[in-house]
Image: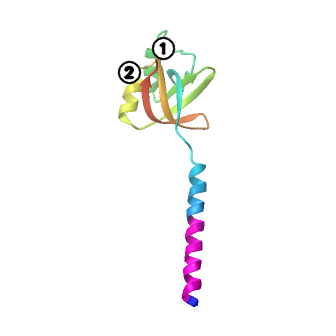
């Protein structure tokens, strides 16, 4: 009888752990797509270093600012260490792109960058 109770307790514990994992994964951040203009976090939508948006973005990023994405009136800071994503952001500075990633507190953790149609 004791082994039977122990086996039932083990099954209940497994059920609780599996249920907890399922609930926590449903609250995990999901990747979204954002389409906007590549800028920098220092200037946002209004560039001051140059009359050329792409040139200003590159100057500000060279000075340490992070890339940003301007979507309507909202400016998202882009966070990535992926060399391919950084190269795409540099190449398309001042242009319209689609960024995929998870957003939290106006910062997007970038997973990919593609040219917007």
Query: Magenta residues?
Result: 3-17
In the rendered view, how is the structure colored?
A: rainbow
Which residue matches tag 1?
53
User: Observer-nearest residue: 101 or 91?
Assistant: 101
Does residue 81 appear to the left or right of 10 in the view shown? left
Kindly identify the residue that appears in the image at 43 percent across and 15 percent down. 55
Q: Quadrant of residue 24?
A: bottom right
Q: Image quadrant for the N terminus?
A: bottom right
Residue at mark 2:
91
Q: Which quadrant of the figure has residue 114?
A: top left
Residue 23: x and y in percent read 61, 55
Question: Magenta part mainly helix, strand or loop?
Answer: helix
Label 1 CA crowd tier, 10 Å (few <14, some 14–19, many 20+): many
Q: As displayed, is residue 64 above or below residue 29?
A: above
**Residues packed near mark 2 inside 10 Å, few (<14), some (14 to 19) or many (20 plus):** few
In the image, 75 versus 17, the foreground residue is: 17
Question: In the structure shown, which secondary structural element does the residue marked by tag 1 occupy?
Answer: helix
Q: Residue at x 52, y 38 (%)?
A: 31
- Give how far across and how far down residue 57 sits, in percent: 47, 20
Residue at the extreme bottom of the image, as rendered: 1
Q: Is residue 12 magenta?
A: yes
Which of the labelled discs sits on residue 88, or is there none?
Answer: none
Residue at point 55% right, 76% down? 10
Q: Is residue 101 visible?
A: yes
Secondary structure of the residue carrying tag 2 is helix
Up-down relation of residue 66 to residue 94 (above or below): below
Q: Earlier in the sequence, mark 2 or mark 1?
A: 1
> In this rendering, does residue 66 appear at all?
no
- Report, in whole angstroms, how far the alpha carbon at label 2 lies from the one at label 1: 12 Å
Identify which residue is drawn at 60% across, 61% down. Answer: 20
Q: Position of residue 18 (x, y in %)?
A: 55, 63
Q: Is residue 114 left or right of residue 35?
A: left
């Amino acid at each position: 009888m004791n082994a039977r109770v122990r086996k039932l307790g083990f099954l209940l514990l497994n059920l609780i752990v599996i249920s907890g994992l399922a609930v926590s994964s449903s609250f995990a951040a999901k990747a979204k797509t954002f389409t906007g203009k590549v800028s920098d976090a220092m200037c946002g939508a209004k560039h001051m270093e140059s009359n050329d948006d792409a040139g200003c973005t590159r100057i500000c990023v060279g000075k340490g600012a992070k890339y940003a994405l301007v979507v309507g009136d909202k400016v998202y800071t882009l966070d990535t260490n992926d060399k391919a994503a950084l190269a795409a952001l540099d190449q398309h500075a001042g242009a319209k792109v689609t960024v995929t990633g998870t957003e939290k507190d106006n910062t997007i953790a970038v997973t990919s960058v593609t040219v917007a149609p």
